[in-house]
Structure formats: structure tokens, C-alpha cells
Amino acid sequence: MIKKRWLSVFAENEIGVLARVAGLFAGKSYNLNSLTVGPTEDPTVSRMTIGLTSDDRTFEQVVKQLDRCVEVIKVIDLTETASHQKELLFVKVRACTRQEIDDLFRFAGVFTVNITDYCRDAVLLESTAPETRNDELIRLLREQFPGRIEIVRGGGVAIEAIGLAER
């Protein structure tokens, strides 16, 4: 069954590791939806959050290939795990009237979206929300402002949820 999948990959924080991991996907013709990388609390280790859409067999091959990489320390499948996931989204709305700008400020309050920048005829919205929530935001803005939006999506990040027993 083809579905959206999430991996958390811990790897050595060294030059070329990201290129090798990305190359692994390109070499096998796997398609990445999202790849976000940053150092962890240990500066010698990076954490990659990888989003991809695949069937079970392909996903199993991806995990095995990652496990074989010398620089990879640990691979965690977050697909079925309780986790917190967020994606960075910027949406620029252009050619706005004064009333539309006022509406976007109210809209931002309702949808918990930040106004990062604005001028007399444009507004830049910033959202850090789950991918599905950002999809809904984009859908609404496309309907309200057809042909006047510019979208930039950053990679998703995810972390395992803290269990209730640990609280």
C-alpha cells in the first residue's frame, strides 16, 4: 500500500554524509517528499527527518539501505509511531487591497499563523503546523486569492511523542 512515511535518521555530522544519503535515494529512484537536517544536542551527530511516499516493499528497502550506510547511527520509522510533526510554510499574498490585508491579519489570528512581513499591497504569512494543516491553509488561500500567492515549503521535522507513562 502506498502511503506517506516518516523516518528519523541519526548520522555522523560530517561533510558529505547528507550528500551520500540523498544520493542513495536518487541512485535507487526513490522520491523524497521532504528532507530536513540539523545537528542534535551532540554536535557530532545530525538528525535527518525524511518524508517519502512509498509502498511497503520500497520503504523496507529504503530502511535497509540507510542501515547499511557507515555514517548512519540509527534509523527510526516514525510512520506508525505517536509523534509530533511540523512543517515550515511561507505564503506571500500579492496585489492586496487594504481590506484584504486587514482580512489576512484577522485570518492569521484565527489560524494561528504569523504575519512575518507586509507592505501596502502584500502580506507574508508564516505557518509552522503539521503538513495536513498547511495543505488546508494553502487550499483556502488559493480559493480566496487565486493567482496571487507564492508558496515556499520547508522540510518537515518530527520527534517521538512523550508517553503518558513518563509524565
Image (cartoon, rainbow, N blue to C red):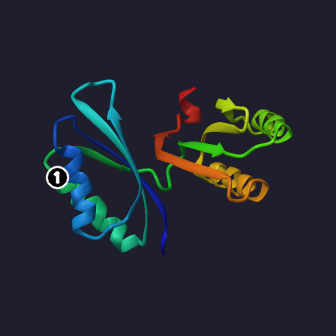
Residue 103 percent location from the top left of the image: 83, 39
**Tag 1 residue:** 69
Q: Nearer the viewer, residue 10 or 121?
A: 121
Amino acid identity at mark 1: Cys
Q: Residue at x 22, y 58 (%)?
A: 23
Q: Nearer the viewer, residue 71 or 115?
A: 115
Horizontally, residue 35 falls left or right of residue 166, namely left
Query: In the image, is residue 120 above or below residue 149?
Result: above
Residue 85 percent location from the top left of the image: 53, 43
Q: Nearer the viewer, residue 119 or 66?
A: 119
- Quarter of image, res 111: top right
Q: Residue at x 79, y 54 (%)?
A: 144
- Give the crowd class for mark 1: few <14, some 14-19, many >=20 residues within 10 Å: some
Horizontally, residue 83 falls left or right of residue 54, namely right
Q: Residue at x 37, y 65 (%)?
A: 31
- Quarter of image, res 108: top right
Query: In the image, is residue 26 above or below residue 158?
Result: below
Count the labels in the image: 1
Q: Looking at the rendering, in which quadrant would you find the C terminus?
A: top right
- Quarter of image, res 135: bottom right
Q: Classify mark 1: helix, strand or loop.
A: loop
Q: Nearer the viewer, residue 35 or 115?
A: 115
Residue 130 percent location from the top left of the image: 60, 46
Residue 84 percent location from the top left of the image: 55, 41
Q: Residue at x 65, y 51 (%)?
A: 149
**Which residue is farthest left?**
70
Horizontally, residue 66 falls left or right of residue 104, namely left
